Image (cartoon, helix red, strand yellow):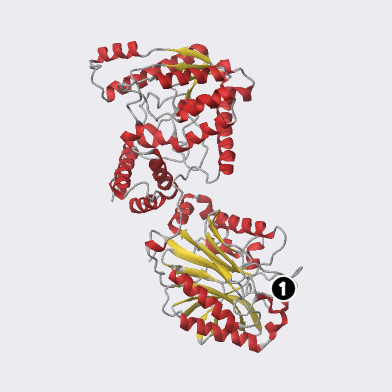
Amino acid sequence: MSVYGIYKTAALSPRVTVACPGKNADTALAMLHQAAAMGVGLAVLPELHLSAYTCADLFHQNALIHGCERELGRMLQETEKLSMVWVCGLPVRMGAGLYNCAAVCQYGKILGVVPKTYLPNYQEYYEKRWFVSGSSLPEGMTVSIAGQQVPFGRMLFRFGELVLGVELCEDVWVPVPPSNLLCLAGANVIANLSASNELVAKNDYRRSLVERQSGGCIAGYIYASAGVGESTTDMVFSGACTIAENGGILAENARFEEGGSMVTGCIDVQKLMAERRKNGSFHDNAVLMGMAAPQLPVIVGQEPELKESDIDRRWNPTPFIPDTPETMEIRCREIFSIQSCGLAKRLSHTGLKKAVIGISGGLDSTLALLVAAEAMKRLGLPPENILAVTMPGFGTTDRTYHNALELIASLGATLKEVDIRPACIQHMKDIGQDPEVHDITYENTQARQRTYILMDLANKIGGILVGTGDLSELAMGWCTYNGDHMSMYGVNASVPKTLVRHLVGYVASVSDERTKAVLEDVLDTAVSPELLPPDANGEIKQKTEDTIGPYELHDFFLYHFMRFGCEREKLRFLALRAFDGRYDEVTVDKWLAAFYRRFFISQFKRSCVPDSPKVGSVSLSPRGDWRMPSDADRSSWEI
């Protein structure tokens, strides 16, 4: 059975011999058995693999057609004990027509045969010389092949949660591919049996086509193309194989392999269906195209077997962060631009020309100050229009204090220092709080005092208070209600903590040496609200991650919880896979429980957060991505 909706798939391109079904069946069987041994549940072979694509007028010969049917029968016999579903290309006769087809097979049975819809007949292609299109076939047709009477035409195949649709090569190159309609009708994985020859730069275009089709259809896409061994009379085939999922490439092979090649990829069908349910336009499109109600026959097969040990997919432990340095720089530059443009628009709309920011020397306030400085540049305003306020409290350390001062000076902002300790002591006296009791009241007194000062300073100078809190803090409720939780515009509110660090690092890389030096020291400082006194050495004692857990874990939980609605057990499984060797089961279970608890009890804080720009695919704004009752019970998520 599948594991949490994950299905292991393969695109195969065995070596082919032109017009020799026996040898082609042999190479196909060898790869199919190899794939089955690897735990593959769905394997896709190339277009016309049993005959070879380049047979030309030999397609008019009975010997070739009969040979393909005979060898398909042999393949069925030799795979009758495999739970794996496999799809093979071959020519199929029906009546007066010859069709370029895909046979979907499992447990020694042909579940259905799907003919190609669009036959290329231009440039180097002459398919209409030999084949007819399946586009005009009436529903309910059957064909006799390899001793079996099977459905013939457009259809879907269901295997547990996986619903398969099939198209062939040219079908995906047209303006409205059959896969569009197949997915609107319910398919969540598309198999494309192809014979795409190689030309200069064609592979890049073909790859992007597969990538884009999987994204537009919110589907998995398995593309298997004919390879080495096809006739080179006029064309060369490379055996290009690609597996994509919702706009991203899961796996692709090395081309031009003499012995043929294969590639495997684990497609998460639950993830795809979650995305479709959230995307209302997907359903609207199905209604518009007349595909919302069942329109195609659905052939039901058995769900292929899969062991957890055979899952070879890698899950990114930092899903908010790009995998490569090149992509990271591009992404950080874009996010920084979104943040600064958002703040610039708010300033220009209000007619205000000044901004107030509380600067602690920590990551979040550092990023907010950098964003504000960039916003001032965009508006042609001097950096002095930023009032950067340091507010030393009971937990402020020399390191963060001096980093705050140095950053303010290097950026040219206006510095103001307000020691909050006397006011906090007076306030604690007023409410009867013992200053020696370092509880939540002791901490929140400082956070609210700082916000009180910042709000009034913004009024005093005619500016807006820029919030510094990030997405991870909102998710975990790690902010003081009506304290650092509040501002007039929050520039970091949809930036997760793991990404804040990279954004600051990006700005450091493009800054002058003075600014770069202080930013690098900020990056090297432990994350802390600094609301409790330092240790005996004057170092930070209150470290956030000691209390609430590693931010990298919580950001991972948040991403998969918000994007795909993962249930607890699947989220646990993904985390253990992503952080293998770094966090054991006990640690993951501990912080996953903490994530659910803190996320559910903290919704009241998220229900009234200030405006902020959305920068990525996950946001907790009550006006945008997330509407949740503040008193929802979490027990269903902890099962």
The residue sitting at the bottom extreme is 63
The residue sitting at the front extreme is 537
Q: From what the image shows, is residue 17 above or below residue 272? A: below
The residue sitting at the right extreme is 123
* x, y percent for residue 399: 42, 21
* x, y percent for residue 631: 31, 38
Dividing the picture into quarters, in which one does residue 524 lie? Answer: top left
Residue identified by numbered label 1: 232
Q: Nearer the viewer, residue 476 or 138?
A: 476
Disc 1 crowd rating (10 Å Cα; few below 14, some 14-19, many 20+) is: few
Q: From what the image shows, is residue 530 above or below residue 330? A: above
In which quadrant of the rendered image does the N terminus lie?
bottom left
Q: Residue at x 23, y 20 (%)?
A: 437
Dividing the picture into quarters, in which one does residue 95 lie? Answer: bottom right
Q: Secondary structure at mark 1?
A: loop
Can I make out residue 198 in this image? Answer: yes
Q: Nearer the viewer, residue 565 or 263?
A: 263
Can I make out residue 349 in this image? Answer: no
Q: Nearer the viewer, residue 509 or 434?
A: 509
Locate residue 501 relative to residue 331 in the image: left or right: left
* x, y percent for residue 296: 52, 69
Q: Nearer the viewer, residue 289 or 627?
A: 627
Amino acid type of disc 1?
Thr
Q: Residue at x 55, y 41 (%)?
A: 328
